[in-house]
Image: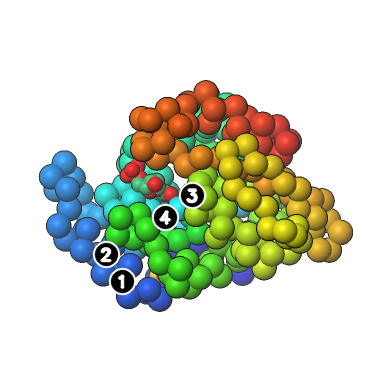
Amino acid sequence: GSLAELDAAVTGCRACPRLVSWREEAARVKRRAYLDWEYWARPIPGFGPPDAALVLVGLAPAAHGANRTGRIFTGDPSGDLLYAALHELGLASQPTATSRDDGLELYGVRITDPVRCAPPDNKPTVLERDTCRPWIARELTFLRPTVRAVVALGGFAWQALLPALAAAGWELPRPRPVFGHGARVTLRATDGGPPLELFGCFHVSPRNTNTGRLTTGMLRDLLGTAAEVAGL
Ligand code: DU
Ligand code: SF4
């Protein structure tokens, strides 16, 4: 198999009944501003080249963002911040992300979510997080030969990511590393390959940026450091 095949396969997953109905309900009701959109309403695969050196991990698609457009962080305020920062760093071809066919390309970076379907209140349950884990674990396994740095965007991403990294072949330090903005941990590869640098970053949601908890400068600095460590 290939990563492209995995990306195609995940879009057919219906393993979480609550999320299947939520993603489809959002597509039926829609938001006023998006009445003429045909919502994607399926799981969202990762986005970016299959030989990425840097991987960014979010939470789950937004019901009227990625769940509408079909591409991760595309069409929501969080994505506006993230793609603008990536573009400033030379890692994205354009600063905006509006639809699946807007021409956006990422350079050396892949973005993915540990939960691939839009959850109510942006809060997946523990069971949903665990049910979705094999998808990100398999994705990380494909990326393993090239990935050198991973950024967890928020505490949920951090918690979800650690067991997925272990499943994909990296050693987890004990005690379990604690999430924080600027947290940084080196993970050894179980097969003696190159290590992976894991970074924690406050989530890019408007709730964090509006309150000044995460500024665009902080985001750019952290992503810049991670990109440099990844050799980008
Ligand atoms: O507030 P918002 O931009 O609509 O995003 C909602 C929520 O989902 C926020 O916590 C960001 C997160 N998110 C994500 O983790 N992955 C995505 O693909 C899109 C949004
Ligand atoms: Fe499948 Fe993941 Fe969506 Fe659950 S959240 S239905 S496991 S893709």
Q: Rounded to the nearest whole Å, what is the CA distance between mark 4 and mark 3?
A: 6 Å
Taking 35 as reference, is 165 left or right? right
> Is label 1 in contact with label 3 (beta carbons under 8 Å)?
no
Disc 1 marks a residue whose amino acid type is: Arg
Can I make out residue 2 in this image? no
Of the numbered discs 2 and 4, the one sitting upstream in the chain is 2
Q: Rounded to the nearest whole Å, what is the CA distance between mark 4 and mark 1?
A: 14 Å
Q: Provide residue 202's location: percent of width, then percent of height.
A: 51, 40
Disc 3 marks a residue whose amino acid type is: Gly
Q: Residues within 10 Å of mark 3 (few under 14, many from 20)?
A: many
Q: Residues within 10 Å of mark 1 (few under 14, many from 20)?
A: some
Q: How many marks?
A: 4
Disc 4 marks a residue whose amino acid type is: Ala
Picture residue at 34% right of the left edge, 60% below the top: 119
Of the numbered discs 4 and 1, the one sitting upstream in the chain is 1
Q: Rounded to the nearest whole Å, what is the CA distance between mark 2 and mark 4?
A: 13 Å
Question: Pointer 2: what residue?
Answer: 22
| Disc 3 Cβ-to-ligand 1 distance below 8 Å | yes
| Disc 4 Cβ-to-ligand 1 distance below 8 Å | yes
Can I make out residue 230 in this image? yes
Question: In the image, is residue 216 above or below residue 47?
Answer: above
Question: Pointer 4: what residue?
Answer: 60
Disc 2 marks a residue whose amino acid type is: Trp
Question: Pointer 1: what residue?
Answer: 18
> Is label 4 in contact with label 3 (beta carbons under 8 Å)?
yes
Q: Provide residue 211's location: percent of width, then percent of height.
A: 38, 30
Question: In the image, is residue 36 above or below residue 170?
Answer: above
